[in-house]
Image: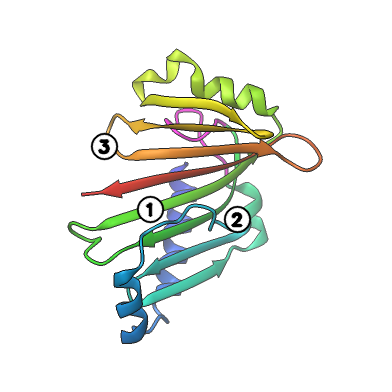
Amino acid sequence: MSRTTLSVLAAAALLGACDARTNPEQADNAAAAPVSAEGKAEEGKISLKTPGVDLTISLPKGVADEARAERDSKLLYPGASLLGMAVVAGPGSDKTGDSEVEIRFSTADAMDTVAAWYRDPARADGFDLERAAKEGDGWVVTGVQKRDEHRFKLRLGPRPGGGTDGRLTVRHRD
């Protein structure tokens, strides 16, 4: 993800968090719930859910249309359009807890081409691939990032009108 895109997304999340109020009942319920962002990234939105904070920001159309994965990205398919993001963190996630991020993306490239990029041995410097298999009309790819040993799961599916939709979920567990 480009630094500019990341900065815009981070600034949007921080700006939205300024108005967030801590609700003790939400915090208690969040403590008991498992941490999962999988399937929660919505197109054109960034969501943040932590104990006491449940926030969703709609991205301005210009930002949503221009966000692209960089060519040197280790986990995001190069040139893919970034469509949305969901961040979910559990209690203590600032020091020892679980957190998960799902990034939703799309590309005009065929699904088998995208899956082949992830299976290519040239990706071995960025992650260890555990599994890459067809599942229904899509692909599921799992592995571990080498740099920080975070586990990831990628779901690829056909995009309506052609191309590929992807949902990349990265889990951080201390």
Magenta highlight on residue 150: no
Indicate the position of residue 17 as horizontal and vertical percent values.
40, 74
Q: Is residue 146 above or below residue 17?
A: above
Q: How many marks?
A: 3
Secondary structure character of the magenta stretch overall? loop
Residue at 30% x, 79% y: name it.
28
Indicate the position of residue 155 as horizontal and vertical percent values.
56, 39
Residue at 49% x, 16% y: name it.
120
Label 1 or label 3, whichever comes before in sequence order: 1
Label 3 or label 2, whichever comes before in sequence order: 2
Q: Is residue 107 left or right of residue 33?
A: right
Q: Is residue 14 above or below residue 154?
A: below
Q: Residue furthest top?
A: 121
Residue 11: quarter of image: bottom left
Using a 10 Å C-alpha cutoff, classify the residue at mark 3 as few (fewer than 14 neighbours), some (14 to 19) or many (20 or more): few
Q: Which residue is identified by label 1? A: 100
Q: Which residues are magenta?
A: 68-78
Label 2 or label 1, whichever comes before in sequence order: 2
Residue 72: quarter of image: top left
Indicate the position of residue 59 as horizontal and vertical percent values.
59, 63
Measure how far apart labels 3 and 2 are at the Cα level: 28 Å
Residue at 40% x, 44% y: name it.
170
Q: Is residue 23 visible?
A: no
Residue at 30% x, 64% y: name it.
90
- Whether pointer 1 and pointer 3 mark residues with C-beta atoms closer than 8 Å, the reply is no
Magenta highlight on residue 76: yes
Amino acid of disc 3: Asp
Using a 10 Å C-alpha cutoff, classify the residue at mark 1 as few (fewer than 14 neighbours), some (14 to 19) or many (20 or more): many
Q: Which residue is identified by label 2? A: 63
Q: Which residue is identified by label 3? A: 148
Q: Secondary structure at mark 1?
A: strand
